[in-house]
Image (tube, rainbow, N blue to C red):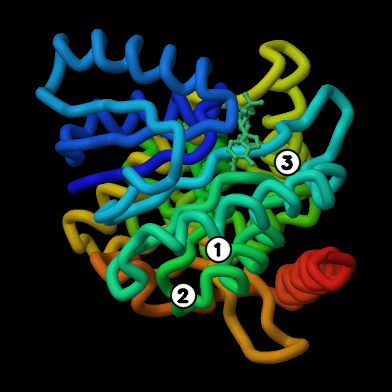
Amino acid sequence: MKIAIIGVGSVGSAVATAVKNTGLAHEIVLFDRDGIRARAAAEDLGHASAFSYDIKITAVSTYRPIKNSDVVIVAAGANQKPGETRMDLLHKNAEVISDIIPRVMANVDNKNVKIIIVTNPLDVMVMLAQKLSKLPANRVIGTGTMLDSARLKIILSRQLGVSTRSISSYVLGEHGDSSVVNWSSVYVGGIALDDFCKQAKISLPQTTRNTIEHRVKNAAYEIIQGRGATWDGIGAAVADLLYAIVHDEKRILTTSIVDGVGKNAVAMSLPRIIGVNGVSMNLRPKMNSAESNALRKSAKIIRKNFDLL
Ligand code: NAD
């Protein structure tokens, strides 16, 4: 399995480390427009690989060596500065995606390659990458709300005293400020959340749910405030998505792909079945009317921003 990572800053490096640690790839190729940074990352990761799996890690200065990559991960572009929203990066990062995708497509096998988009604003960048690559929508996959769903799961796990592995919970819509916590589809050990709370004698009133939503939506802002950027969580999310693809797991992950046609097409996160061909099915989880309305609003925000490009 050959993986190319485009953009080797904080996120690209964390992605490379997480992917290396899965042992899935025999080769990782790193490209960054800052060649010195890419070479340094390849050196450092190469040394780290002596403690895990044999893997060839190289920095490249042109796109030609990404040939035969099975998956190309795009983590290039500006990140949020404290106080900035993801959508504030729209025009800057649209330029980056417009630079990268045609060069990628000129060098990979368009019948096989899958592209994973990490760059923000995630959903709009997925739409742009899919349009520029002309690949089928199921093979241009954004990590979407995988990270937001993980954050929700962790908070719920602590609140309910149950392992994250026994909780099924999704954040839907934009990977951004209009994301939607899908309370109606939270299950704990196969039991609907409200029933679980009754059995466990746990109170989860609306005020607590509002606080949880706030924490999920603001997690990135808080990490950026304290650490300058976020990288470990997204590195793990990309490695997990890659694992589901490579092992043809048919696992359900909240990823973002373009769905719909013409003016109605939009990329946003829904639970989707992931396997070796990318997304094989889009699912619509149970939603109450407030959640459905919020999801529609989120889709409109993404589409409106795509139309600004
Ligand atoms: P960073 O500044 O540390 O690194 C960005 C890298 O991209 C730099 O090394 C830069 O040289 C490179 N780059 C810029 N333009 C390029 C181009 N045209 N071609 C090749 N390389 C180019 O930023 P970061 O913290 O690594 O963040 C990268 C992106 O990931 C940002 O857009 C950020 O918002 C996003 N991000 C997404 C998630 C998510 O959940 N999807 C999470 C965290 C960060």
Nearer to us in this view, 224 or 297: 224
Q: Report the mark closest to the observer, 3 or 1.
A: 1
Q: How many marks?
A: 3
Where is residue 126 shown, x and y percent of the image?
A: 60, 62
> What's the amino acid at mark 3?
Lys
Q: Quadrant of the C terminus?
A: bottom right
Q: Report the mark closest to the observer, 2 or 3.
A: 2
Nearer to us in this view, 57 or 142: 57
Q: Which label was assigned to residue 196?
A: none
Q: Which label was assigned to residue 217?
A: 3
Tell me the CA gap for discs 3 and 1: 17 Å
Nearer to us in this view, 42 or 255: 42
Instruction: Please tell me how crowded label 2 is: few (under 14), some (14-19), or many (20+) other residues with Cα within 10 Å.
Output: some
Q: Which label was assigned to residue 256?
A: 1
Which residue is pictured at 54% across the width and 40% down the height?
75
Tell me the CA gap for discs 1 and 2: 15 Å
Left or right: 256 in relation to 116? right
Q: Say what secondary structure mark 2 lies in.
A: loop
Q: Earlier in the sequence, mark 2 or mark 3?
A: 2
Q: Is residue 294 visible?
A: no
- Identify whether 161 is placed above or below 3: above
> What's the amino acid at mark 1?
Ser
Left or right: 109 in relation to 202? left
Instruction: Please tell me how crowded label 1 is: few (under 14), some (14-19), or many (20+) other residues with Cα within 10 Å.
Output: many
Where is residue 160 shown, x and y percent of the image?
A: 49, 36
Q: Which label was assigned to residue 135?
A: 2
Nearer to us in this view, 119 or 302: 119
Q: Earlier in the sequence, mark 1 or mark 2?
A: 2
Which residue is pictured at 75% across the width and 71% down the height?
299
Which residue is pictured at 74% across the width and 22% down the height?
222
Q: Quadrant of residue 260?
A: bottom right
